[in-house]
Every structure is written in structure tokens, then in C-alpha cells.
Amino acid sequence: MDWRITGHKRQLEFLENAMLIGRLAHGYLFAGPNGVGKKTIALKLAYELLGVEAEKFNPDLLEIDGTLGIKIEQIRELSYKLSLKPYAALYKIAIIDAAEQMTLEAANALLKVLEEPKPYTIIILVTSNPNKLPKTIISRCQKITFGPAEASASAFVENSADRSAGRPGDLPIEKKDALKKSEGYYQIFKKGEMIDRLIAVSDIAQLETDEIKTMLDDWLKNLETELRAQASKALASQISQVMLAYKYLEQNVNSKLLLTNLMLNT
């Protein structure tokens, strides 16, 4: 996908991967300072999902500008429109800008929509002050943090590290550093959250085939050690999946698709 946007490489890769494997969330929270392109990216994502004509008037794209505040009546109207099936696309997408300006009543009304989303709805909250949003709203959304273009990658990854309970979030970009992080990738493979797994896939896929094989060898050794210490069907299944991935890698299967399948099915 050609975003035609400078910076935010990891954030865009994450969204692209989610589209590629059909794992888009029903609720997103795009958080970061004003002027870094959060809403632009939200619109680009909507246009991609709704089709080439989406930039013109499109009844499947709903927007609320919260600059002057967002009242419960606006959310109720949005909720009604989201309850209707898409007119021309596969999705119905709502973008709420300056979402932190919602009244408490409006936020409670939106929470009901986020708790019971229609299968075709995607709601993107755009905010420069996520701390002003109720925690119940934040918990229902996939949070993506944006910073100034040159710093956005590190900010995003630090956010991922927080969710990973101390596991390495500083996923490397340079190939020479990637193998040193094999253990970090292994921990993500074992128990990382969805967003961390997708970021890891993007990084590992940049390696040469032999480097990926070396990493998978390390994973197998770890898994076999754990299995000897304690028999487990889950561990045996993970060993089988890693071995299968290794086999397919030798057959020149697309490494990114292979790694995505491995990371998301453990």
C-alpha cells in the first residue's frame, strides 16, 4: 500500500499487516501530539478499505470533529448510522477526531458501541490527550502511538514494550542487531501480544534466510529444553510448528507470510 506519508514506518507496517491477514480491530486509538499525521493516516486507512472512490462523499465513512466538544447526541447518531449495513463497501468506518473532548455521557454511549461492534464496523479515535479518555474506552481499542516522524518508531516500540511486561520492545531494524535479539523474539513468539507479534514479523522478515534458520534453530533448542523439563502438549505443538516453518523456509516459501502464520498460530 502506498501511504504517501513520511515517517511512522512501524505504525504503517502494523496496519498493513493487520489488513493483509484480516485481523483489523473494531476499535483503534491513534494517540500522539497535534500535527504528526494521526488523522491523515486514519483517513488513508479508511480510503484503502472503502475503495478508490472513498475520498469523495462516501456514506460508509463517518466523521466527527470534536474540536468544539462531542455531545451524547452526536454519538447516538453515529451509533445509529453504524448499525446500518455498509452501502457500497465491506466496512463502515467512523473517525472521531479530538476524541478526548467527549462528554462523559458521550463516552458511555460510545463504550456500548465498542463493546458490541457489528462485524463490519471500525471506529478510529484520534487524540492528542489519551489520558482524558475513560480507561474503559481505551481498553476497548487497539492503541497506536504516534510521535514526530523521526521519533515515531521508537515511541511506538516503547509502547509495545510496556504491553509486553518487560520483554524487549526495542525490536531492531539493522540486520546485524537482529540475531542478538533472538531471545527477545522467542519470548514474543511464546507469549507476546498481537501487536508485538506483528512488529516482530516485520523485523525478522528483513533477515537473510540463513539468519532466520539460525534463529529458528535457537527457538527449537529452547522449546526442547522446556519440554524435557516439563511435558506439555502446547510445547510439543510449538516444536512442530517451528519445524514446519523451517521446512517451508527451505522450500523458498515467502518468509513474511510464513512468519506471520507461525507467530499468529501459537
Image (cartoon, helix red, strand yellow):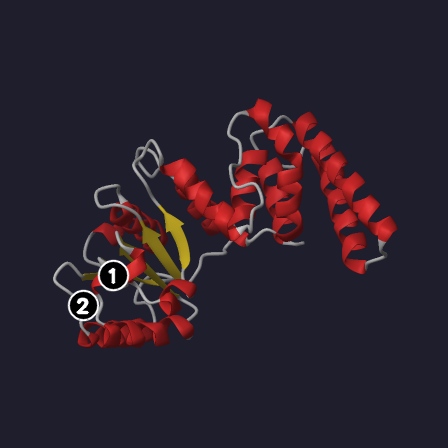
Residue 165 or residue 77, whichever sits in front? 165
**Residue depicted at 73% across the width and 32% down the height:** 250
Please state the horizontal and vertical placement of residue 77, each as a whole percent of the image: 22, 75
In this orientation, does residue 154 appear? yes
Instruction: Name the quadrant of the N terminus.
Output: top left
For this view, does 89 lie left or right of residue 18? left
Q: Earlier in the sequence, mark 1 or mark 2?
A: 2
In this orientation, does residue 63 appear? no
The residue under label 1 is 99
For this view, does 218 lie left or right of residue 200? right
Circle 2 crowding by C-alpha within 10 Å: few under 14, some 14–19, many from 20: many
Please state the horizontal and vertical placement of residue 57, each as a whole percent of the image: 19, 57
For the residue marked with disc 2, what is the amino acid? Ile
Looking at the rendering, which quadrant does residue 136 occupy? bottom left
Residue 96 or residue 185, whichever sits in front? 185
For this view, does 265 lie left or right of residue 128? right
Please state the horizontal and vertical placement of residue 189, each as a whole percent of the image: 64, 47
Looking at the rendering, which quadrant does residue 85 occupy? bottom left
- What kind of element bears circle 2? loop
Looking at the rendering, which quadrant does residue 231 occupy? bottom right
